[in-house]
Image: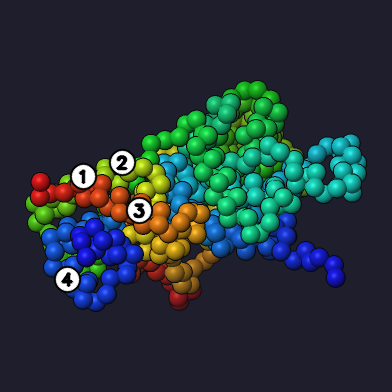
């Protein structure tokens, strides 16, 4: 039997299917790792263009690690890499919004500022793992697969990240 | 179970109901819960997979078209290469495309320090590594250019190619609408049906394949100053631009879509902007649940 060519990345529909499957994970990874000031959307685009150019050399099973590695290296090798900044949304209020007094608003702002600094100060790997879990609600197993690390490592990173954040925003001390 | 174990298990979502209940009584939990509740504010902005997919498609196609638009002498050689192995093309290195979308960057400088400013809903792409050989960008949307003098600078759009030496000009390329305005120096516009040179203060429009020329007095496009201006433009295109600028939907009822509109609207006052279109065009409008309902006189 002839080897089938169905799963070749050089086929546009295979390539686009991989994009649909992986692009938003890759985007989240880059966003939480490097912040919005480093244009995570563009990095995703560049990584996929590189995948396309190398479609003959990369099997579909290897596409994920290829994309994550390429995008990560691309960023690390960019000379003008900007400081990671993760802004919080200011205007976003829940539906049950009630009129708040100024003191409460001020406290809330101070708390968010502290939290922002704490998150930004985390080592990149811990930050990605932590936010993928707490914000994107990804399970340990999913994160381990996404980043190519063990579940044990995920657990360790989450715990250290939480400990650091608690120390930095801790109000009782 | 000690404190650390409890927190680890909570992070892994592995606490039993009783354990969870006990954990919720602790001071640790109150502190962590507060952090957890606030983390939602840091969620990554939404990733628009469909939009990004079409950007990717156009990048990939651009690579094909740069390849195919080589001078004809090279085309023969090129076709030989295609026959002798597609791999060569796919593996051609350095075709590193940079794509800039107005959603993340509104103005920037190209490698030769030519200046670009992007209006809402516009995308520009170019090849940074080839920049020294060819100054060429692909455009979808509306962009104001200030080009450093030097070799030919070209802007490719679906409506044709605009090429210049060093000058300031505005290109607007939307569905069914193309407009180029020259603010300094000279600009050449080429497509299948037109090949003309514009001087300072001249403007060419192509609407549904009809070409018209006129002149302007402004020194730079009005949208740079927070206004959109139109000259004899079909109302439906004006409304499209309006929707794009205010990111709002317009429900049009009995609207004379083909009627021509000349005038402008501001970008920072929805009500005033609507008035400036509705009043001269004899329309009435309402703003309801985040959309605009615009209606014409049904008796006509």
Q: Which residue is mark 2?
A: A121
- Earlier in the chain: of badge 1 and badge 3, it is 3
The residue lying at 49 percent from left, 68 percent from top is B255
The location of residue B188, given as percent across then percent down, is: 69, 35
| SS state under label 2 | helix
Residue B17 shown left or right of residue B149 in the figure? left
- Earlier in the chain: of badge 2 and badge 3, it is 2
Residue A17 shown left or right of residue B243 in the figure? right
Q: Which residue is mark 3?
A: A156
Residue B245 shown left or right of residue A73 in the figure? left
- Same subunit: marks 2 and 3: yes
Task: Say which of B208 and B290 sits in front.
Answer: B290
The location of residue B210, given as percent across then percent down, is: 68, 53
Q: Residues within 10 Å of mark 3 (few under 14, many from 20)?
A: some
Q: Which residue is mark 1?
A: A168
| SS state under label 1 | helix
Q: Could you say which quadrant of the image residue B111 lies in?
A: top right
Q: Residue furthest front?
A: B1
The residue lying at 67 percent from left, 43 percent from top is B156
Q: Which residue is mark 4?
A: B22
- Same subunit: marks 1 and 4: no
Q: CA distance from mark 1 to mark 4?
A: 25 Å
Judging from the image, mark 3 belongs to the subunit labelled A
Task: Say which of A82 and A169 sits in front.
Answer: A169
């Amino acid at each position: 039997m002839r080897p089938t060519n169905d799963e070749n990345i050089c086929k546009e529909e295979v390539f686009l299917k991989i994009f649909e499957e992986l692009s938003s994970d890759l985007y989240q990874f880059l966003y939480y790792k490097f912040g919005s000031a480093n244009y995570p959307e563009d990095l995703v685009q560049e990584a996929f263009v590189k995948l396309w150019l190398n479609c003959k050399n990369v099997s579909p099973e290897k596409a994920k690690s290829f994309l994550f590695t390429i995008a990560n290296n691309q960023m690390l090798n960019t000379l003008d890499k900007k400081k990671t900044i993760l802004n919080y949304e200011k205007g976003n209020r829940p539906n049950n919004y009630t009129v708040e007094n100024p003191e409460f608003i001020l406290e809330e702002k101070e708390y968010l500022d502290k939290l922002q600094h704490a998150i930004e100060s985390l080592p990149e790997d811990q930050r990605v793992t932590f936010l993928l879990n707490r914000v994107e609600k990804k399970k340990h197993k999913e994160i381990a697969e996404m980043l190519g690390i063990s579940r044990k490592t995920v657990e360790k990173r989450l715990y250290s990240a939480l400990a650091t954040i608690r120390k930095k925003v801790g109000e009782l001390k | 179970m000690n404190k650390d174990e409890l927190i680890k298990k909570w992070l892994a979502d592995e606490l039993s109901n009783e354990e969870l209940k006990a954990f919720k009584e602790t001071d640790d939990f109150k502190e962590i819960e507060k952090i957890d509740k606030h983390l939602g504010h840091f969620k990554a902005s939404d990733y628009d997979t469909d939009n990004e997919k079409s950007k990717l498609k156009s990048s990939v196609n651009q690579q094909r078209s740069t390849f195919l638009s080589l001078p004809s002498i090279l085309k023969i050689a090129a076709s030989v290469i295609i026959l002798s192995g597609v791999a060569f093309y796919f593996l051609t290195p350095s075709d590193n495309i940079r794509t800039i979308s107005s959603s993340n960057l509104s103005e920037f400088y190209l490698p030769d320090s030519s200046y670009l400013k992007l209006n809402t809903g516009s995308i520009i792409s170019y090849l940074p590594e080839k920049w020294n050989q060819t100054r060429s960008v692909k455009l979808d949307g509306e962009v104001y250019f200030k080009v450093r003098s030097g070799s030919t600078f070209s802007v490719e759009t679906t409506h044709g190619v605009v090429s210049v030496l060093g000058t300031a000009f505005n290109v607007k390329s939307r569905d069914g609408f193309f407009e180029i305005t020259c603010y300094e120096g000279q600009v050449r516009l080429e497509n299948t049906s037109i090949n003309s040179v514009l001087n300072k203060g001249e403007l060419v429009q192509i609407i549904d394949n009809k070409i018209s020329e006129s002149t302007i007095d402004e020194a730079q496009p009005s949208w740079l100053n927070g206004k959109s201006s139109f000259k004899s433009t079909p109302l439906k295109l004006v409304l499209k631009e309006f929707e794009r600028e205010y990111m709002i939907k317009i429900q049009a009822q009995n609207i004379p879509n083909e009627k021509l509109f000349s005038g402008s609207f501001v970008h920072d006052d929805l009500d005033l902007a609507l008035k400036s279109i509705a009043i001269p065009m004899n329309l009435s409008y309402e703003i309801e649940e985040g959309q605009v309902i615009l209606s014409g006189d049904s008796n006509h």
